[in-house]
Amino acid sequence: MFQEIIEKTEKIIKKNWIKSLYHGTGGIGITFEKLLNIETNTLEIPDYNQIEIKTKLNNNKGYITLFSATPDSYLFEIKRIQQLYGYPDSKQPKYKVFNLSFYYNKKTYISKSLYGKLNIDEKNKNISLLIFNKLDNLIDSDCSWSFDLIKEKIERKIKFLFLVYAEQQIIKNEVYYKYINYHCYTFKSFEHFIENFKNGFLRITFKIGVVREGEKAGCIKDHGTSFDIDYSKIEKIFNKA
C-alpha cells in the first residue's frame, strides 16, 4: 500500500531546502504534493491513490485535521449557527463569524453568556453540538453529525494516512521547507474514534468566515467544519503500518 509513496518521499528527504510554492499556512502540504507530482485538490478523496497525506512542522504539536464534515441535521445548519451564535468579525465587526473548536469533555465559551460542548448519543447514533446559557440551561441541540456520515467520511478519506514531517526556515522573507521524516498509519475502528472523542483527544472546529468586501460582502465564507485530533494522541485511533 505505502511502498510507492515511501520511495518517492525518500528521494524528497534527500533534497536540500525547498522554497515554498504557496504563500500561507498550506505551503508545507502544497509544496510536498507538487514534489510528488500530484495536483492539489479540495475533493473528498485521498490525496495519493487511497492514501491521505498530512504534513506538519517537526516542532509543532497541536492538532491535525482528519477530514471535514458539514452537519447533516439541517441543510442550512452553517448559516443558522452563524446567524444565531456568530460574533463580530475582527476587521468588519458589522459581520458575524464563527471560528471555534468544541470538545466532548469541556466547555467552549461562545460569548460571556453562552458556551457549547459536544454530546455523543449512542442511541440515536450521532454527535451533536449542545449550546447552554450561563445558567447551564440547554438552549440548542439541533446541530449534529450522524454516525453514518462520519463513518462514510472515515472510510473514504482516512483509512490510510501518510504523515510527513518537515523543518522550516525563512530566507530573505521567503519560506523554505526541509522534509525529514514520515510515518504510515492505518485506521483502527469507529469504536476507537468515538472512545477518543469521549477522552477529549478529538474535537470539531467550525471555520465560518465572511466575505468582507465587494458585491458579496457579508456573505458566509465557509472554510469547512473539521474533525481534528491532538497530534500526540494519533496512535489512539491509528495503527502504525
Image (cartoon, rainbow, N blue to C red):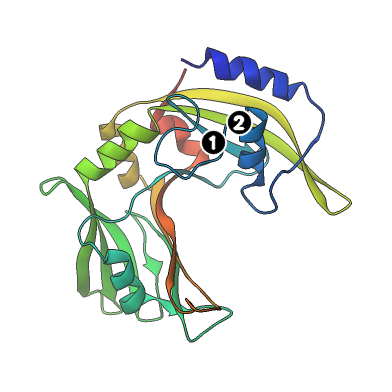
SS for tag 2?
strand
Extreme-left residue of the structure: 123
Q: Which mark is residue 164?
A: 2
The alpha-carbon separation of the residues under discs 1 and 2 comes to 6 Å
**Residues at badges 1 and 2 in contact (C-beta under 8 Å)?**
yes
**Among the 4 quarters of the image, the one containing residue 205:** bottom left
Q: Nearer the viewer, residue 31 or 91?
A: 31
Residue type pointed to by label 1: Lys
Q: Residues within 10 Å of mark 1 (few under 14, many from 20)?
A: many
SS for tag 1?
strand
Query: Residue 99 location in percent, x, y?
Result: 46, 66
Residue type pointed to by label 2: Val
Q: Nearer the viewer, residue 213 or 86?
A: 213
Describe residue 170's horizontal placement relative to residue 102 as left or right.
Answer: right
At a point 60% along the width and 31% down the height, the residue shown is 164
Residue under circle 1? Answer: 54
Describe residue 95's horizontal placement relative to residue 156 as left or right.
Answer: right
Q: Nearer the viewer, residue 173 or 56?
A: 173
Extreme-right residue of the structure: 172
Q: Residues within 10 Å of mark 2 (few under 14, many from 20)?
A: many
Query: Residue 180 location in percent, x, y?
Result: 71, 27
Q: Which mark is residue 133?
A: none
Query: Residue 76 location in percent, x, y?
Result: 26, 66
At a point 51% along the width and 17% down the height, the residue shown is 2
Describe residue 84's horizontal placement relative to residue 182 as left or right.
Answer: left
Where 159 sits versus 140, above or below?
A: above
Where 210 sits versus 200, above or below?
A: below
Where 103 sits versus 140, above or below?
A: above
Nearest to N terminus: mark 1 or mark 2:
1
